Image (spheres, rainbow, N blue to C red):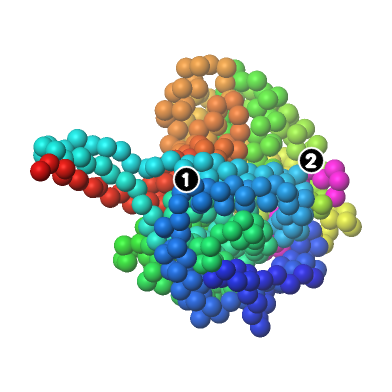
Amino acid sequence: MRTLETLSGGKWLTTGDWIDVHDPADPGTAVARVPAMSAADVTRAYDHAEQGFAVWRRTSPFERSRIMTEAARLLRERVAEIAEDVTREMGKTRAEAAGETIKAADFLEYYAGVARQGYGALVHDVRPDTRTSYQREPLGVVLAITPWNDPLITPARKLAPCLAAGNAAVLKPATDTPQAALHLARALDDAGLPAGVLNVVTGRGAQISEALVSDPRIAALTFTGSNEVGESLRARVAARNVRFQGELGGKNATVVLADADLPAAAKAVAAAAFAQAGQRCTATSRVIVERPVYEEFTALLLTEAAALRLGSGLAAGTTMGPLVSARQRDSVLADIERAVAQGASVLTGGGRPAGEELSHGCYVSPTVLGAVTRDMDIWHQEVFGPVVALLPVDSFEQAVTAVNDSAFGLAAAVFTRSLSAAHRFADEAECGQIAVNTTTSGWDVHQPFGGFRDSGSPFKEQGEEALRFYTRVKTVAVHFGA
Ligand code: NAD
């Protein structure tokens, strides 16, 4: 078992207390341990962040850009080692973990370029001989709290724009998957990030939550995770006027219209529903199919599900790994059981896979549910596992109504050959991300990303839009007359 240190104030720290990290393919074995920081350690991380911000805000954008570019290069150079650690702590396949590492490098590179641009504009001034402009400047210390499903990309998605804009950060990765964030911190530290600009807090929620969230030096809180935790954090910081960005749950729908390319739709739904064992905020979990093609589409989807090979993410040939933990597996199994109790039928999967090799891991078979109705919990509640619910409908209008029958509004897709249906869908689906003839997941680093309704908050991530969250606007009038 490896012992890892965490980064605070430019130093790699250990503590006397540890948190074990487990491999979900073999949860009996701890693969690593990380420091369980105390509340006092967390407060010290904010001291360091405050000092780091004083340096970083005055570091030239070109130097910031250079450091971020170098960190991206280091991530690419270390992709094999990092991907293996991500697989060992989270369970996704080695190929998925390598893709995640490369995308994290993309985030750093993209925002390294953005860092070189000024953010602002000249505006007219009614006063003579007066030139007025506005500029965007950093906020200060940003707290980033991230989940376990994309343990490297999610911190990178937040830290890259945060640092490009000149902020310092305290990053709290998920307790189940801290190694990925520590790799990111290592790359930035090795690239020359000044001390205190990034501080990583590893610890047990109950012991550190108060020190983490109540520190008066937090200027903004960016959170990705569950609605339950996100909404409570939002409420905790609101009274202090701390800016909050939340990327929360989803219940993403894909619509298959009767004129669709059905094999392409089935492949896309299987990819969006079962990649990372369904543990993606943008995973397709509801499929709404026009009745004339319902049987044919269902048969194609079942064929795609049957072709998946479950196993350890490190084993050659595995196309679907385990869920992140026994807790998550049991939660998904309970959701399936409740759906069946409410009248859904299991068309494939529905439980743990058979076989000695898989029996001790955190596996759930890819599951397709039929006979689903819109009053069932499975229609409304996020499962965050490899489970899709099918619903037949009789028209485009019914399909859109079904898509929008959700408290969430993250991503939706439509499969059709009709240009008119595609554009009407993009206008009428109440989601932040709309896909036509492609998957609900897989948005690029420069594309604005974030959900409507209970899936998100007004601030988007990714692209230049992300800078709205990480900067504030200052207006400057200069009178140059005599
Ligand atoms: P979670 O909400 O349980 O935990 C998220 C993070 O919050 C973890 O780091 C956790 O340790 C921390 N946390 C929990 N309680 C805390 C507290 N009281 N104080 C401070 N920190 C606390 O979520 P999860 O189970 O790790 O992730 C799965 C969820 O994340 C799903 O609901 C999924 O939809 C969501 N998610 C959303 C997006 C998106 O972009 N919309 C992306 C990925 C995941």
Three-letter residue code for mark 1: Ala
Q: Where does the image place residue 296, in percent across and percent down from the top left?
A: 70, 24
Dominant secondary structure (helix, strand or loop) of the stretch shown in magenta: loop
Which residue was labeled with disc 1? 115
Segment tinted magenta in the rendering: 315-328
In the depicted structure, whether residue 288 falls above or below residue 258: below
Look at 45% across and 63% down and name the residue there: 55
Find out whether residue 326 is within the magenta segment. Answer: yes
Pick whichever of labels 1 and 2 is earlier in the sequence: 1
Residue 172 higher or lower than 389, as above or below: below
- Going by the image, does 460 lie left or right of 201? left
Q: Quadrant of residue 117?
A: top left
How many discs mark residues in the rendered view?
Answer: 2
Q: Residue at x 57, y 21 (%)?
A: 416
Q: Residue at x 68, y 37 (%)?
A: 271
- Judged from the image, the secondary structure of the residue bearing numbered disc 1 is helix
State the residue at coordinates (65%, 77%).
14
- Residue 79 rendering spot, x and y as whole percentages: 73, 49
Q: CA distance from mark 1 to mark 2?
A: 42 Å
Q: To which residue does mark 2 refer?
A: 308
- Viewer-nearest residue: 359 or 242: 242
352 relative to 175, above or below: above
Q: Secondary structure at mark 2?
A: loop
Q: Amino acid at mark 2?
A: Leu
Quadrant (top left, top right, bottom left, bottom right) of the C terminus: top left
Residue density around tag 1, few if under 14, some if 14–19, many if 20 or more, within 10 Å: many
